[in-house]
Amino acid sequence: MAETMTIGKALNSGLRRAMEDDSKVLLMGEDIGKLGGVFRITDALQKDFGEDRVIDTPLAESGIVGTAIGLALRGYRPVCEIQFDGFVFPAFDQIVTQLAKMFARSGGRVALPVVIRIPFGGGIGAVEHHSESPEAYFAHTPGLKVVSCATPHDAYWMIQQAVASDDPIIFMEPKRRYWEKGEVDTSRSLLPLHASHLLREGTDCTVVAYGPMVRVAVDAATAAAEDNGRQLEVIDLRSVSPLDLKPVYESVRKTGRLVIVHEAPLTGSISGEIASKVAGECFYSLEAPVMRVTGFDVPYPPARIEEEYLPDLDRVLDAVDRTFTF
Amino acid sequence: MAKANAARAGSRASSGAKRAPTRAKSGGRSAAKGEVRHDPEFVQLLTPEGERIEHPEYSVDFTDEEYRGLYRDLVIVRRLDAEATALQRQGELGIWASLLGQEAAQIGSGRALATQDMVFPTYREHGVLWCRGIDPIMPLGLFRGVDFGGWDSRAAKMQMYTVVIGAQTLHATGYAMGIAKDGKVGGDDGEAVIAYFGDGATSEGDVNESFVWASVFNTPIVFFCQNNQYAISEPVERQARAPIYRRANGYGFPGLRVDGNDVLASYAVTRRALDAARHGEGPSLIEAYTYRMGAHTTSDDPTRYRIASEVEAWQQKDPILRMRRFLEQQKIVDSAYFEGLESEADELAVDLRARVLALPDPAPASMFDNVYPHGSAALAEQREQFAAYHAGFEASTVEASTVEGGDH
């Protein structure tokens, strides 16, 4: 059954369905109750499921994650909302030293099915700390899994899969795409949570992206086809950790070229990991070095120049062009 | 181990002669000589001299059997702790965090727990582990470096040791929220949580956040702070300008200070606080005023930051010494009892040592176990590469030994 909805609404519907499916699912966060969250992702859920299951918490992120861990130890499945990407850091210790490691610490006896939702990325004209892309910190932490949705269909299903998973999941939501609409097939999910997805087939260059940059990659492919007939193959990673790179290897063996796109700063980022893996797996297929189109190694800039920081269609096409100069 | 913990102190079902306190407490810590008054800020039921005193709010009658049981706990956990320190000195443990001096705070609070209560410890709660019936080898496995503790936290109703200071107080608070959600408060069979932490932890944000959460959600939790006067080298004055227990007032729940070297008082106040929590009366803070008589861990050198006379003064308030004086003065036991107990503790220590030395190192590839409940294809790949790398050595070792064998 296909319905048209925004990514924000798809997340809301997915959370609703997860709560209907399992009475142990709780939502926790700042302003998520009556207000429905600053982005309204939890809109009306408190009204329908009660204050006991949709909890407006005190304003302290470490407390949100730390008490969620305790609730998970008790048998609940908490879904925490961190209001903005840049506010996750007070909870960083609880996520990295506790949530990620307690399954191992318990000798594999006690799983912690906690989901941490983080609206991330820029492009909304916000002030400092409201536009960041901190996913690499979490991807670098064993014990966590990190995913990001890019379409309403994935938003609807991936949030449910994340809630159903016993692994701790960092769920990165592309905040500037919350209002973009698409088809959601509410009858079936098609893909497991940690699988990448071939979005558009092509023969000349592979473009890999996740979260808010998937749209940019798809637009670049459309523009390339119109501009000079180059056929770009676009892959939505979906899972940042663990990476599902087999479709990427297969694609690069076909195209010989790879451009990776993300908003996060360049150094120490996910794209470096992908480039290294692809160099190892596709060494004899590569026609050019792996190119990366990313944010820069700077504090996220003031909003009036953020579009100069964010990868866009032109920067992606420029990178594609450069792969043809070798 | 069943034998070791057979006599659970504090069981109200046990019969036997109850021994009333000898007199009301005279002279709080700051009271003038001869003045009789209760210090509401310091609960004590047994003086350092071994005198059993009364407290208007925290009166508990113990049977002789219970007194003996508590004393036995104190002696055994100190003996096992000494054995662990010795094992570290001999290179058999990487490090050891001794509980020396804090036995009464841990045994008193640990024996006050109901079976259904859940414990969230730091990394020094060896005495509480003992009260939970957990094999004392478990923390030694952790400090030897063969695992992360090894006990089943659900079966034992005691979570794993937490090394990051204060982090567990939030877990405890969340768990207590879950108890309330499950409707398991409001009666004698209600569940409560106890969260252990130290004076240093009270400066951590997580501890303060847990106070906020526990208060606004009215969770069934007891915050049990062992103020042992030091956070490694830093005295408590570097963490707090006002007494720690008074912080509770600012968060909206009761707090009190107990003589943490008094096992009877530690038991009484903890039991009262846990019962209040399980009956839905919300959180409370207990500051157990005690002293870390040894080093922070075996890596520490306390002579660099505190003087001998301070340690000597606290030795006069030793938790075991005062209990022994009381048992002797009241003729609850005879000298043969002490000798028998000493032998029993020694035997347990010898057994513990033998079992620690026999602990096998974990298989190298076991580091890949238990990272994710659902596994990870990427991690499985690393594990395969690791196994293949090691298999290469094994193959060459086999080849070498085959060649060597051929020479003979």
Image (cartoon, coloured by chain):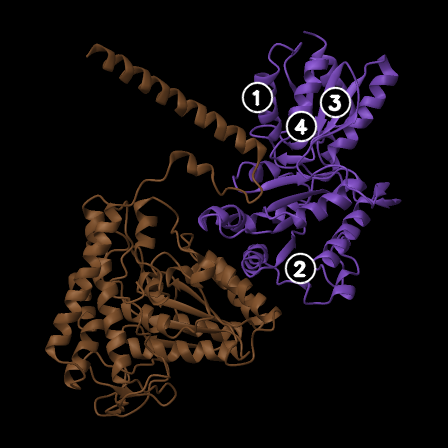
Chain colours: A purple, B brown
Asked if A141 appears above or below B282 in the picture, the reply is: above
Spatial CA distance of label 4 from label 3 is 9 Å
Query: What is the secondary structure assignment of the residue under circle 1?
Result: helix
Spatial CA distance of label 3 from label 2 is 40 Å
Look at mark 3 in the image and give the residue it sits on.
A316
Look at mark 1 in the image and give the residue it sits on.
A276
Residue at 78% x, 15% y is A203
Q: Are marks 3 and 1 in contact (CB under 8 Å)?
A: no
Q: Are marks 3 and 2 in contact (CB under 8 Å)?
A: no
Q: Amino acid at mark 4?
A: Thr
Q: Residue B253's x, y, as percent?
A: 51, 76
Q: Residue B246's x, y, as percent?
A: 43, 74
| In front: label 3 or label 2 | 2
Q: Residues within 10 Å of mark 1 (few under 14, many from 20)?
A: few
Does B131 sit left or right of B294 as displayed?
A: right
Q: Which mark is residue A26?
A: 2
Residue at 28% x, 90% y is B18
